[in-house]
Image (spheres, coloured by chain):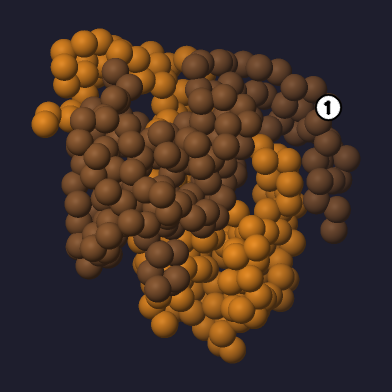
Chain colours: A brown, B orange
């Protein structure tokens, strides 16, 4: 079956600092015309930080869209188009947690919202993380707490539905499967 | 640390059939005012279909936002606010693949896009799936192929970056960890 859809017209309908929303007119595989609405996003990177004694460093922050505090791996949007995931991840790890690592490994890249966004999140694991005092420099509208967990606690937080963030679940599960 | 943000004003800036985009003015924990932009979404449900002989049923469809064909577990938006995930999943499983199951188990609920959407995806596993000829009735602008895979093939497709869809990766990883 032919699956590809061809762009006929593309119209920017909304724009802000981190995403542009488009309404495109497309030609479907059956030659009918339809509309696709989606966001263009610079992409993001995220990292599962593991300390030298195998503990997991996670962040807590209020996520306004879901109106609740969310426990997540450190992550952030890319600063510019084409920024390397590894550079983004090093920055976010330090800014959000004060931890650093010289042993970062790429895990996978995921599309978290294929239905209406082109956002891709590159996920890394940072092994041998070390706490560096005093380097933290958050964005001015970000309020982030850091907490260090036993791996078993993190698994329980996922199993009990406390951790719901997709990139965090993917990173932790991948880490468990790699061990 | 206080993390909660308080809504001061909420403004709908864009709306379509499956999401509403808001620009809200919020009071930050430090009492400064900031803006939060996010989408309200009805939510979705997805299901990992496993046949009686332990094969995995996946869909292939063109995902316009990422401009490529994506291999995924069957999934769909909820039809109305409050629709049960299990009802949504049964419908999508049949519509997209022609498979049915009497053995559906809830796995977890995930927020796939906490930064700018309240979308929650409930993920299920459907065991003992059976192919039912002739029940398929897709949405008219959806073109979906179904393919049955060995589990090892699916793992390879994730490891090699062919499967990138977050809900699919979460479901497969969780299934592997449960075995």
Quarter of the image with the N terminus of chain A in it: bottom right
SS under mark 1: strand
* Residue at 74%, 62% in the rendered image: B145
User: Left or right: B15 with respect to B82?
Assistant: right
Q: Is residue A78 above or below residue B34?
A: below
* Residue under the point 11% across and 31% down: B1
Residue B103 position, x and y percent, is: 44, 78
Point out residue B25 in the picture as x, y percentages from the top left corner.
Answer: 30, 13
* Residue B97 visible in this rendered orientation of the protein: yes
Tell me if B131 is positioned left or right of A101 in this view. right
Q: Chain letter for mark 1, please.
A: A
Mark 1 crowdedness (10 Å alpha carbons): few <14, some 14-19, many ≥20: few
Quadrant position of residue A113: top right
Would you name the residue on which mark 1 appears?
A8
In this rendered view, identify the residue nearer to me: B49 or A75: A75
Give above or below for B170 relative to A35: below
């Amino acid at each position: 079956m032919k699956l590809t859809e061809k762009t006929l017209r593309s119209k920017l309908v909304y724009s802000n600092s981190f995403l542009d929303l488009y309404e495109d007119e497309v030609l479907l595989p059956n030659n009918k015309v339809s509309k696709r609405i989606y966001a263009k996003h610079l992409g993001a990177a995220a990292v599962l930080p593991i300390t030298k004694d195998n503990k997991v460093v996670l962040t807590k922050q209020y996520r306004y869209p879901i109106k609740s505090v969310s426990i997540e791996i450190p992550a952030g949007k890319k600063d510019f188009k084409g920024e390397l995931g590894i550079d983004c991840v090093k920055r976010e790890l330090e800014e959000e947690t004060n931890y650093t690592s010289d042993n970062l490994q790429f895990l996978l890249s995921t599309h978290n919202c294929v239905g209406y966004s082109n956002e891709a999140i590159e996920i890394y694991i940072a092994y041998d993380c070390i706490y560096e005092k005093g380097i933290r420099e958050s964005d001015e509208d970000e309020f982030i707490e850091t907490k260090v967990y036993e791996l078993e606690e993190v698994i329980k937080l996922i199993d009990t539905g406390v951790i719901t963030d997709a990139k965090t679940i993917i990173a932790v599960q991948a880490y468990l499967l790699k061990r």
